[in-house]
Image (tube, grey):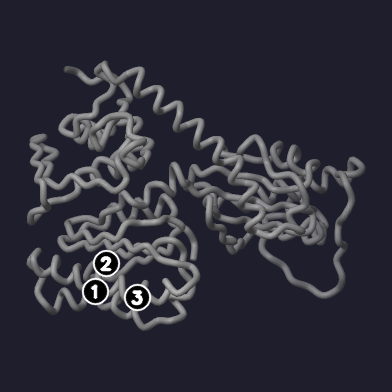
Amino acid sequence: MPLLSQSEFKRLSQSASDYSTSIYLPTHVAGPEIQQDPIRLKNLLNEAETKLSEAGLDKRGVQQQLQPGFDLLEDDHFWRHQSQGLALFLTTEGMDLYRLPLAFESLVVVGDRFHLKPLLPLFFSDRYFYLLALSQNQVRLFQATRYHISEVDLQGVPTSLAEALRYDDPETQLQFHNVSGSGSVPNYHGHGAGNDDNKENIRRFLRVVNEGLHPYLNQEDSPLVIASVDYLQPIYREVNTYPHLLEEGVAGNPDEAKPDDLREAAWEKVASLVEASHQQAMEQYHNLERTDQASDRLSELLPAACRGQVDVLFTQANAHCWGQFDFNSGQLQQHDQPQPQDQDLLDLVAVQTFLQGGTVYLLDEEAMPTQTPAAAVYRYALAS
């Protein structure tokens, strides 16, 4: 199952409904605990039933909305193919389901929009990235995180240099659609690009690979890591137009490596980027925390996030601040326990920050830069 993309996240954030139900469940990929996962989901669905009824949805509506979730309970094949976490988003119109490499806390939230904060590590601290496994004999694109990798089904991308050279005029014919045909095709080996003609053929081939990847990458800002032998990497960088290609790739022939080994090697490159960005953001907050360009007061940073003024947000991962916020008036109410019509204000500030181009870090309590559950750096100093 593909990972959640930014465009999917934005679609979920815009799927407003009076009885939007979000369910998060930690799951298991192996061992006897797998048998307990359906039971845990059943308990969460029962909890959702209660919350939907309390919110005013009639019995028929509750049953209609949650039935797709209950249908999963008896699906043995489904439970044998899990990741670390399961996220369900249900309305009376249907269900969206994601198996994700994130260890969620068990949670049910019912409100007028989906609860999405637990998904944000996919785009930041445990973020997903793309891995292009590239050789003259094979082209594969993977979507991966630190603990998970899945191959993308590519259409419109040449699968090998041999396939590309079937065309008489590579410059005009490599507007690719996949081709099958009879007869043998050469298998390319060697330690370099060879003569000038071969190097130009490789460049043309990689140019079309780059163009063919546009539909898979043009809506994203996730890092792209190349895995290839050394001589292909500089040629691909010459023709690459994806702005988030990392400078350092994974060296070696990817055709001989297992996907998990490629993922582990590529994550080392991505992790250093993530850690550097995190440290820079933390230093920026501490440098600005006593100025008008930073705050750890939810009453200040929540309206700022809704206006698109938050550049970086730190928020406690499994904390919740229940209440109501009126954007037009700026009025904020907070409650110790969730009340009817309440929403998680930490979810609201995190999602709004992300949707408007800010960076969001979900941290453990001890890693937070302040004693409060949220802190932010603004794009510019706010008027006092």
The reply to whether residue 309 is visible in this rendering is no
Question: Could you tell me the amino acid type at mark 2?
Answer: Leu
Relative image position of residue 353 (x, y in whole percent): 31, 38
- Vertical comparison of 145 with 70: above or below: above
Residue visible at 59% across and 61% down in the picture: 151
Number of residue marks:
3
The reply to whether residue 62 is visible in this rendering is yes
Q: Quadrant of residue 78?
A: bottom left
Mark 3 / mark 2, whichever is N-terminal: 3
Q: Is mark 1 on a helix, strand or loop?
A: helix
Residue visible at 10% across and 46% down in the picture: 336
Question: Could you tell me the amino acid type at mark 3?
Answer: Pro
Mark 1 / mark 3, whichever is N-terminal: 3
Please tell me whether mark 3 or mark 2 is closer to you in this view. 3
Looking at the rendered image, the quarter that the C terminus falls into is top left
Give neighbour class at mark 1: few <14, some 14-19, many 20+ (Cα, 10 Å). Answer: many
Extreme-right residue of the structure: 195
Q: Is mark 2 on a helix, strand or loop?
A: strand
Q: Are marks 1 and 3 in contact (CB under 8 Å)?
A: no
On the image, numbered disc 3 is attached to which residue? 38
Marks 1 and 3 sit apart, C-alpha to C-alpha, by: 14 Å
Q: Is mark 3 on a helix, strand or loop?
A: helix
Q: Do the residues labelled 2 and 1 touch (CB within 8 Å)?
A: yes
On the image, numbered disc 2 is attached to which residue? 90
Marks 3 and 2 sit apart, C-alpha to C-alpha, by: 17 Å
Question: Could you tell me the amino acid type at mark 1?
Answer: Leu
Give neighbour class at mark 3: few <14, some 14-19, many 20+ (Cα, 10 Å). Answer: many
On the image, numbered disc 1 is attached to which residue? 66
Give neighbour class at mark 2: few <14, some 14-19, many 20+ (Cα, 10 Å). Answer: many
Marks 2 and 1 sit apart, C-alpha to C-alpha, by: 7 Å
- Vertical comparison of 219 with 1: above or below: above
Viewer-proximal residue, 193 or 207? 193
